[in-house]
Image (tube, rainbow, N blue to C red):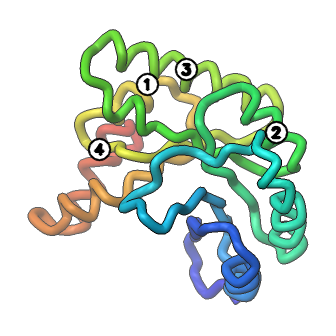
Amino acid sequence: INLSQLPVNLECSINDEIIDIVCDLKPHRATLVPENRAEITTEGGLDLLADSNSFLKTYVAELKEAGIEVSLFIDPIEEQIEKSIELNVDAVEFNTGKYSESNNKNEENLELEKIAKAIDFALQNNLKAHVGHGLNYNNVQKLAMLGTIEEFNIGHSIVSRALFVGFEKAVKDMMKILGIL
């Protein structure tokens, strides 16, 4: 039973045991992410076009039957969005890793353009658009200026900053950058 009055987005890997736990916990949303045991952080979005992901349809249906909104962490590529639509998910979270790790303004602008196009395509197809991975106080503003993103997943940067300034200030500072305050 979801005990939180605030929406809870549980990012989780994809296997029977985890999906069962998520269905028992009943968070507001589950965002399915790829997981590689050797990685420290997610290295990319789910590859929905791979044959090995045929089980996703079953997991998405299970989660939705449990009353849980489903999101998929994917790269900002039209074919990945099309597959998300086929899987009947509610939202997609676009991997902003390449944007966040850009080495120069040209690369950053190219990645920003890819994300903007992907968001537009998702919205045109009734998917909620979220973004996340590597976002921080220095790089999130350009994404916020797009004005079409429903959710920003920026936990690591906020928590790290909160160690020095406290959670209230860390969150308020981010909200100002996002134009929420």
Q: CA distance from mark 3 to mark 4?
A: 19 Å
Q: Nearer the viewer, mark 1 or mark 2?
A: 2
SS at circle 4: loop
Disc 2 residue crowd, few under 14, some 14–19, many 20+, Cα 10 Å:
some
Task: Give the residue number, with chain letter if any, for mark 4.
Answer: 136
Q: CA distance from mark 1 to mark 4?
A: 15 Å
* Mark 1: amino acid: Met
User: Does label 2 or label 3 sit earlier along the sequence?
Assistant: 2
Rendered-image quadrant of the N terminus: bottom right
For the point 86% across and 55% down, the residue is: 54
Q: CA distance from mark 4 to mark 2?
A: 29 Å
SS at circle 2: helix
User: Does label 1 or label 3 sit earlier along the sequence?
Assistant: 3
Foreground pick, 145 / 127: 127
For the point 63% across and 60% down, the residue is: 31
For the point 39% across and 14% down, the residue is: 109
Task: Give the residue number, with chain letter if any, for mark 3.
Answer: 114
* Mark 4: amino acid: Asn
User: Does label 1 or label 4 sit earlier along the sequence?
Assistant: 4
Q: Does residue 7 appear in this view?
A: no
Q: Determine whether label 2 and label 3 are within 8 Å by CB.
A: no
Q: Position of residue 86 (x, y in %)?
A: 89, 42
Foreground pick, 148 / 99: 99
Q: Which mark is residue 145?
A: 1
Task: Give the residue number, with chain letter if any, for mark 2.
Answer: 83
Q: CA distance from mark 1 to mark 2?
A: 27 Å
